[in-house]
């Protein structure tokens, strides 16, 4: 078995992805709206880059997964349906914490922020994937081989989640009734992509929304969603989208006189700023352009 065998699932899904993009474009056109071509192509470029980098990154992570699999606690029969159901739930639990971590630590928000950088919300937005999250995301799934899931099974579970989440990036689907209590839905994911203060850092789940309900990060869709970042990136260049936040972090670190603040630049929450609120705007500007997403503190237990 190979570490990229699971990617066949995504490859098989590509015709469906493209068909849905076309259908959604027609749906929007009938309502007097159109895709922003520049935005869509930027998202596509990000997606292609993500796939190429992920293939290389998986080789190293696969070796670590395979080594850990030697010490597995359980012998699982992957021919049994219930094993896959349990695997999907466990994978989604790991995904929740990976996703929450990527929102709440500045360095890793720098990797994930590009997925939120589009001010559109449609199926092409799902393709706007990070070029740097593949370098660390697999660390959150290390418990799965220890629990008895073969590394190829782990990657297959991740592909199932990725395919499911593609269908969440649309405004064509309204509420889904009782399913909203258990599953992540387009309505819940629209909230996740919102820059409204009440929507920031909400609804981290991949397939399931139960983790958000359990850990205090759930928010239903009420107000109209303003998509994108609180300070948006005014570029469709995929390299700018991928690395703009890292460039800003580097400028902030160079400007920091103390190691303590330099560490907070990297590992503090995204709403933390090295510039005191009382600092005049002219002085703040000396550190370079503002971050693309300087956010208000989240509420309650979501920090």
Image: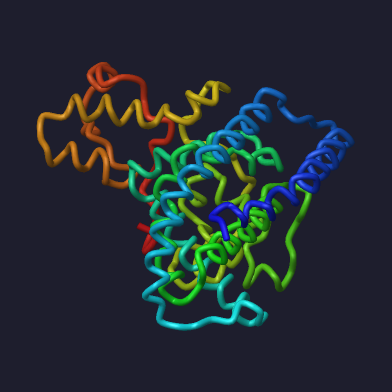
| Residue at far right of view | 30
In this view, 251 is above or below 14: above
Query: Do we see residue 116 in this rendering?
Result: no
Tell me the quarter of the image containing the C terminus: bottom left
Task: Tell me how many marks there are.
Answer: 0
Identify the residue at image location x=64%, y=39%: 125
In this view, 113 is above or below 2: above
Q: Quadrant of residue 186?
A: bottom right
Identify the residue at image location x=62%, y=50%: 190
Identify the residue at image location x=54%, y=55%: 3
In this view, 8 is above or below 196: below
Q: State how the image is colored.
A: rainbow
Q: Nearer the viewer, residue 290 or 129?
A: 129
On the image, the x and y values in percent for residue 38 come to 67, 23
On the image, the x and y values in percent for residue 223 come to 62, 50
On the image, the x and y values in percent for residue 211 come to 50, 69
On the image, the x and y values in percent for residue 37 come to 72, 24
Q: Quadrant of residue 126?
A: top right
Identify the residue at image location x=42%, y=57%: 63
| Residue at far front of view | 1
Q: Nearer the viewer, residue 221 or 95?
A: 95
| Residue at far left of view | 258
Left/right of residue 224 with respect to residue 152 in the rendered view: right
In this view, 210 is above or below 272: below
Tell me the quarter of the image containing the N terminus: bottom right
Q: Nearer the viewer, residue 250 or 13?
A: 13
Query: Do we see residue 75 in this rendering?
Result: yes
């Amino acid at each position: 078995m190979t570490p990229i065998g699971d990617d066949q699932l995504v490859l098989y899904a590509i015709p469906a992805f493209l068909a849905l993009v076309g259908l959604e474009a027609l749906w929007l056109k009938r309502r007097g709206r159109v895709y922003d071509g520049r935005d869509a192509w930027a998202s596509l470029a990000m997606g292609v880059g993500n796939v190429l980098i992920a293939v290389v990154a998986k080789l190293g992570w696969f070796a670590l997964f395979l080594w850990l699999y030697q010490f597995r606690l359980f012998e699982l029969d992957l021919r049994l349906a219930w094993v896959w159901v349990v695997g999907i739930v466990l994978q989604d639990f790991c995904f929740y914490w990976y996703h929450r971590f990527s929102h709440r630590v500045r360095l890793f928000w720098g990797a994930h922020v590009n997925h939120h950088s589009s001010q559109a919300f449609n199926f092409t937005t799902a393709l706007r994937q990070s070029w740097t999250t593949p370098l660390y995301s697999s660390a959150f799934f290390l418990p799965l081989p220890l629990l008895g899931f073969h590394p190829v099974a782990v990657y297959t579970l991740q592909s199932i989640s990725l395919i499911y989440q593609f269908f969440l990036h649309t405004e064509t689907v309204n509420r889904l009734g009782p399913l909203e209590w258990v599953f992540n839905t387009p309505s819940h994911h629209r909230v996740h992509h919102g820059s409204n203060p009440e929507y920031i850092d909400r609804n981290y789940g991949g397939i399931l929304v139960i983790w958000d309900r359990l850990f205090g990060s759930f928010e239903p869709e009420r107000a109209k969603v303003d998509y994108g970042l609180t300070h948006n990136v005014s570029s469709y260049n995929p390299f700018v989208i991928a690395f703009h936040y890292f460039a800003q972090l580097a400028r902030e670190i160079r400007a920091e006189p103390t190691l303590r603040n330099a560490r907070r630049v990297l590992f503090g929450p995204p709403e933390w700023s090295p510039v005191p609120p009382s600092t005049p705007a002219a002085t703040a500007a000396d550190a370079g352009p503002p971050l693309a997403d300087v956010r208000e503190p989240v509420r309650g237990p979501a920090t």
